[in-house]
Amino acid sequence: MFPRYLIPLALACALLTPLFGSHKDPVFQQINSIVAELAKISGLAEVHPVPYGRMTKPQLRKFLAKRIKKTLRPEEIRADETALKMFGLVPQDFDLKKSTIDLLTEQAAAFYDYDKKKLFLLNESSFSDEIDTLAHELSHALADQHFALEKFMDDNSEDDDANLARTAVVEGQASWLMFAYSLYRNHEPPPPSRQMLIDAFQGDAVDNSQYPVLKASPIYIQQSLLFPYSQGTLFFDAVYRRDGKQSFSEVFTAPPADTMQVIHPDRYFAHQESTRPRLPVIPLNSGNRVQSEGSVGEFDHEMLLWEYFDEKEAKELSPHVLGGQYKIVNDSVGQRPVLLYSSEWDSPQTARRYFAAYDHILQSKWKSDSIEKSTGTLLAGHGDSGYYIVRLKGPVLTSIEGIGSESEWHGLERGQP
């Protein structure tokens, strides 16, 4: 479900006119020494100098709006927004496009444009923060010169969960290098300790008063932006501790397949990938069309549980999910979206636990929920989006939400095709 364009700014931006040779800027004067140390730590040599410049936040906001308009069709944005709303991950009045522009503008201190191979710092950045920020973005530049980040991200752009996993590779590797460089600046030998990295991401990052847009965003949106940095850094650290400098190539040439592998590096090492449980089938008319479809990974399940329970419950139950899929089909008769969803769990016991949790999610995400049938393996009734039916069979849960007519629903309840 992860929206392709709701990604860290280093990967979202392109062309703005750079200010080449701005030698009067004391921050940019340090580029050569920073790159030299990053290359030493990573073993990734600089292939060519990185052009650089500055911009204002109004310039950035204007650019982001044009960028989204150029790269995404309006129906793609609506499809992403509909999926998030049908799962109950954002409010029904949530504007995904506006929120994305607001968030990226608020969060930006710098970005590396991997399309035009240029680095930018925002004029509003404070000098005290800029050196580490510069190290982070120059880490992107070095990786791009060796592994073509644009192609790296595009290779799995249609798989939502894999796309987020690859974003975590790019941001996690750059963040790890930033921490290593920070140690060097303080005359301490890299690499950073595991505890240092854990401490850096502990606490509620969105409590910072200088980020009101992020703080006010739904949990899913907050964590979609934070995950590539926090979990991506810990993932890269795990690979580095096993494989040393080889990890700087390994994570790009053999990236994690999904967020499950990012969260659990042992599954990455074991090549354990998420499953794709079969979606339920419903009788639809010939005019129906698929609005969106994709994977529902461990990150998505964690966020769904976090939204309707709490972080503790989310982190306890979500590691047991093996995989998930969804599809949203537009009902040609009622012109309403129908959500098809499946998830597979590591045992019938954990699937039953999630089945009970999903019952609570259904009751919580809608203003009204009229339950017409409830057993240990079946939930059926009427919610805000229409009729729904949720089934549990062994370790697999399936859900159909938004059926337009009662007769269709009763046919599904009886198990008719």
Image: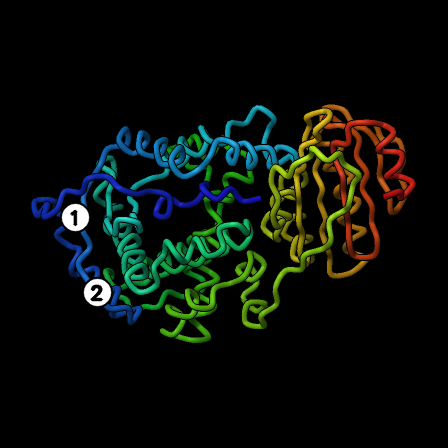
Crowding at mark 2 (Cα within 10 Å: few <14, some 14-19, many 20+): few
- Quadrant of res 126: top left
**What is the x, y in percent for residue 69?**
40, 32
**Residue linked to disc 2:** 47
Locate the N terminus by quadrant: top right
What is the residue that sits farthest to the front in this orientation? 286
Between the C-alphas of marks 1 and 2, the distance is 21 Å
Relative depth, front residue between 20 and 407: 407
Query: What's the mark number on residue 27?
Result: 1
**What residue lies at 21% left-to-right and 61% top-to-bottom?**
35
Secondary structure at numbered mark 1: loop
**What residue lies at 75% left-to-right and 34% top-to-bottom?**
285
**What is the x, y in percent for residue 71?**
40, 39
Relative depth, front residue between 13 and 367: 13
**What is the x, y in percent for residue 125?**
25, 39
**What residue lies at 51% left-to-right and 42% top-to-bottom?**
3
Point out the tag, 1 or 2, that comes first from the N-terminus: 1
Crowding at mark 1 (Cα within 10 Å: few <14, some 14-19, many 20+): some
**What is the x, y in percent for residue 315?**
63, 52
What is the residue that sits farthest to the left in this orientation? 24
Relative depth, front residue between 177 and 118: 118
* Residue type (three-letter) at the residue carrying disc 1: Val
Q: Is residue 80 above or below residue 342?
A: above
Locate the C terminus by quadrant: top right
Secondary structure at numbered mark 2: loop
Relative depth, front residue between 185 and 367: 367
Report if residue 114 is visible in the image: yes
- Quadrant of res 138: bottom left
